[in-house]
Image (spheres, helix red, strand yellow):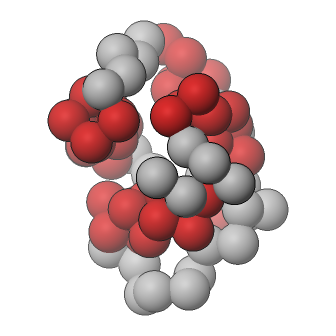
Amino acid sequence: MKLAELYENIEGILELEAGTITGQETLESLGEWNSLAIISFIAFADGMLGLSLNPESLKKAQKVADLVALVQSAINS
């Protein structure tokens, strides 16, 4: 998976328009980052990327870049 595809998937999880995420956003500014989005991101990482994420690490995420760092091993820039 490429970075752009990851952004597209995050946009889908957060129900944002395509092209909204550039990677510099804070999760708080996106508005829809909540417990349901965290669960959805965990399911995405598991199902699409084959990664098991710790929910606590996601709770600590502040920026889209933090999410990228959590799945970095499964994406190609």
Residue 35 visible in rendering: no
Residue 46 visible in rendering: yes
Q: Tell me residue 44's x, y (percent).
A: 28, 42
**Residue at (32, 68) in percent of width and height:** 12
Q: Tell me residue 6's x, y (percent).
A: 49, 57
Relative to 25, 49 lies left or right:
left
Q: Tell me residue 18's x, y (percent).
A: 45, 86
Residue nearest the viewer, comparing 67 with 25: 67
Task: Indicate the quadrant where residue 52 lies.
Answer: top left
Q: In this view, does 45 lie above or below 75?
A: above
Count of number-bearing discs: 0
Relative to 42, 7 lies left or right:
right
**Residue at (72, 46) in percent of width and height:** 65
Residue nearest the viewer, comparing 3 with 10: 3
Q: In which quarter of the image is the C terminus?
A: bottom right
Q: In this view, does 17 lie above or below 70?
A: below
Q: Tell me residue 37's x, y (percent).
A: 33, 47
**Residue at (79, 62) in percent of width and height:** 24
Q: Which residue lies furthest to the right in this view?
A: 24
Residue nearest the viewer, comparing 69 with 17: 69
Q: In this view, does 45 lie above or below 54?
A: below
Task: Indicate the quadrant where residue 29 lies.
Answer: bottom right
Task: Indicate the quadrant where residue 4 lies.
Answer: bottom right
Q: Is residue 72 above or below residue 9?
A: above
Relative to 22, 57 lies left or right:
left
